[in-house]
Amino acid sequence: MEDAINIPAGAYEDPAATANQLSLLLHAATAAADEEFKRTERLERKAVNLATFGGAVFAGGQLVVAGLLGVLRTASFVPYVAALAALATLVTAASFLVSARAWQFRDESSAKLSEISGPDYVGAAVVGNPRVGVNLVQHFVEIASDRRRMNDARVRSLSSATTVGFLSSACVAAEVVLAFFAVAAD
């Protein structure tokens, strides 16, 4: 297949064929942009679910530990459990902060709708200027590329949040195990 960039200007002069090809390109570019927006929504949901799960594990662990510490007759293990509780609290808070980076708003540098809705642009479209279609394709490719760049940053943030979330769960689990051990040793 010949690379479209190497086709000489004026090689295809049929306006209907040009319009059809631009329509296909525009459809592909808008589909790519739509898919990146859907990917954004999925990544944001995963980050929110991760934070929710981390909060539930933390709350459940603290509830179990508080119940267990309430039945202790001696306080020999309490400082150790309290130290693990403090560590679990800090790591869980860090998990929420890292997770929030995955769903925070990011600057949309490519979404300049004024460029394609101005009177000059609309006027060119009305008279059938084929450059309008080319510019629309380029505009949607730019939106999709910009969104992909932002989604890649979200993926990195979600990966970090998953690691910190795992550490948070491990801290809570260690705290609960130590609390059970304290009750058993009491």
Image (spheres, grey):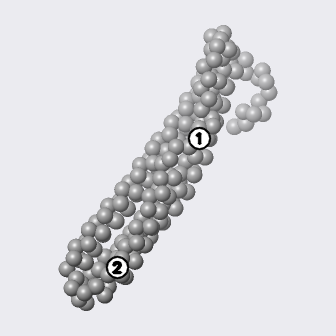
Local crowd at mark 2 within 10 Å, few (<14), some, or many (≥20)? many
- In the image, is 99 to the left or to the right of 123? left
- CA distance separating discs 2 and 1: 43 Å
Identified by mark 2, the residue type is Val
* Label 1, residues with CA under 10 Å away: few <14, some 14-19, many ≥20: few
Q: Is residue 54 above or below residue 4?
A: below
- Secondary structure at numbered mark 2: helix
Local SS, label 1: loop
Residue placed at 79% from the left, 24% from the top? 9
Residue 81 tag number: 2
Q: Quadrant of the C terminus?
A: bottom left
Give the x, y percent position of residue 15.
67, 15
| Residue placed furthest toward the top | 127
Above/below status of 120 relative to 75? above
Residue under pointer 1: 107
Tell me which amino acid carries mark 1: Asp
In the image, farthest residue toward the bottom: 185
Kindly identify the residue that appears in the image at 49 percent across and 44 percent down: 40
Residue closest to the eye, 15 or 146: 146
Is 37 drawn above or below residue 126 in the view shown? Answer: below
Front-most of residues 20 and 56 = 56
**The N terminus: image quadrant:** top right
Q: Earlier in the sequence, mark 2 or mark 1?
A: 2
